[in-house]
Image (cartoon, grey):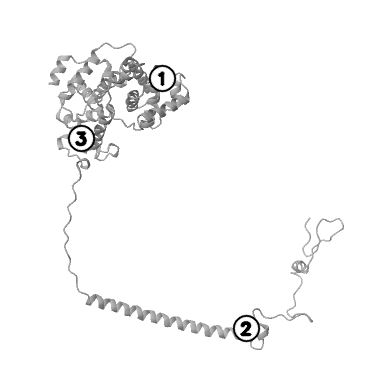
Amino acid sequence: MPFPRGKKPSVTAGSKIPKLRGKGIENQEEGPQVKRSSSPPQGAPKKRTAFVDLTNAHKVHISLPGTKKNSLKKTQKKKATSTVLDKNEANLKNSESQEEEKQRGEEEAPVEELVVVEAVPPRELPPHLRRPQIPEEFDIDSQHQEDPTLTAQYAKEIFDYLKAREEKFILSDYMSIQPSLNSGMRAILVDWLVEVQENFELNHETLYLAVKVTDHFLSVAPVNRENLQLIGSTALLIASKFEERCPPCVDDFLYVCDDAYKREEVIAMETSILQALEFDINIPVPYRFLRRYAKCVSASMETLTLARYVCELSLQEMDLVPERGSLLASACLLLALVTKELGGWSPILVFHSGYEVSELVPVVRRLHSMLTSPPDDKLLAVRSKYSHKVFFEVATTPTVDLDTLERALK
């Protein structure tokens, strides 16, 4: 309970409030009412001025407040202002004398003659660092200089680099080291990967890269038949991480495999594939080259889609696995151009692809044979996909006859 101001709480016998001791606390409480005396009480020791030694009391002159302090302050202020003015004048004189000495030194210093140094000519860049010279009639990128997404100034160099990287990823017929597999099983796996790519709405580059990763792993590691689907789905997972902005998760691939494998098996297979490929999965795929070469001749979307249909069908053919992606893309485009009666292999295509017609003839003939052969009932995913209106129903396009094709290849 609060107490009235100026009154002390009375301490009773049963009170829990401790009794305050000492005069200091009482003085603090009675401060507003009691006035202290300016002179000390009689009999008490005399107080001394702070910092004054009593032993030298006869030498120390203690002045009363308000007598000589003002005069001392005035004299100190005068002395301080006079010394500051003197210092300022001295500094000004020193600076003026220094400026005069500088001017004299500049006037007396001899004028140096300017020596003309000849510009050193730039060193010639090595061949692999030189920007490729593109003739005006073959330039397909200058019109896109303002579009940063197309990187027009580097497009030719990028595709030359991808074409050079193909030498590192050349494959051969690896079925000799796979006693449990055959080309038919591989074709069924590719057909299933096409369905998964459609269901997940993945990019086409992802599908092509997954097939390449699968082939490269099978070329170095013998596997059992039971693990073939595990290898294909894991390769598609790796390709999705490389190509897609939002790749499917591991559980999605377990679902499309009908839970035939465990999560740990997929992760372990992913590690095995990456180690076998030495983590280098930037493998050039024909789909990228096909888009580039179609741009050279300003091919329509329908013609490009027809070439893509032929190229995607070729993924199932084991004897086309050793072909370079750029060569396969060139052959697919040439076959589509002849089918649509749009001419043959023009000089601009020779310049950008680096292939003459004679180099494409064997692959074009093989692709034509693939199109004219009866379809396998187990491999219908690609034909069904490209029979849709979204893909201009190019799977129903009649195949060009062999005589017309041979005349175009001459």
Please say if the residues under marks 2 and 1 sit with CB atoms less than 8 Å apart: no
Instruction: Kindly state the secondary structure of the residue where label 3 is placed.
Output: loop
Give amino acid for label 3: Ile
Near-viewer residue (70 or 294):
294
Q: Earlier in the sequence, mark 3 or mark 2?
A: 2
**Quadrant (top left/top right/bottom left/bottom right) for the C terminus:** top left
Give amino acid for label 2: Gly
Choose top left, top right, bottom left or bottom right for residue 342.
top left
Q: Earlier in the sequence, mark 1 or mark 3?
A: 3
Work out how far the residue at label 1 is from the one at label 3, CA to CA, in angstroms.
46 Å
Q: Earlier in the sequence, mark 2 or mark 1?
A: 2
Q: Which mark is residue 227?
A: 1
Work out how far the residue at label 2 is from the one at label 1, CA to CA, in angstroms.
106 Å
- Mark 3, residue position: 140
Near-viewer residue (188 or 252):
188
**Quadrant (top left/top right/bottom left/bottom right) for the N terminus:** bottom right
Choose top left, top right, bottom left or bottom right for residue 143.
top left
Q: Vertically, is 23 above or below 229?
A: below
- Mark 2, residue position: 66
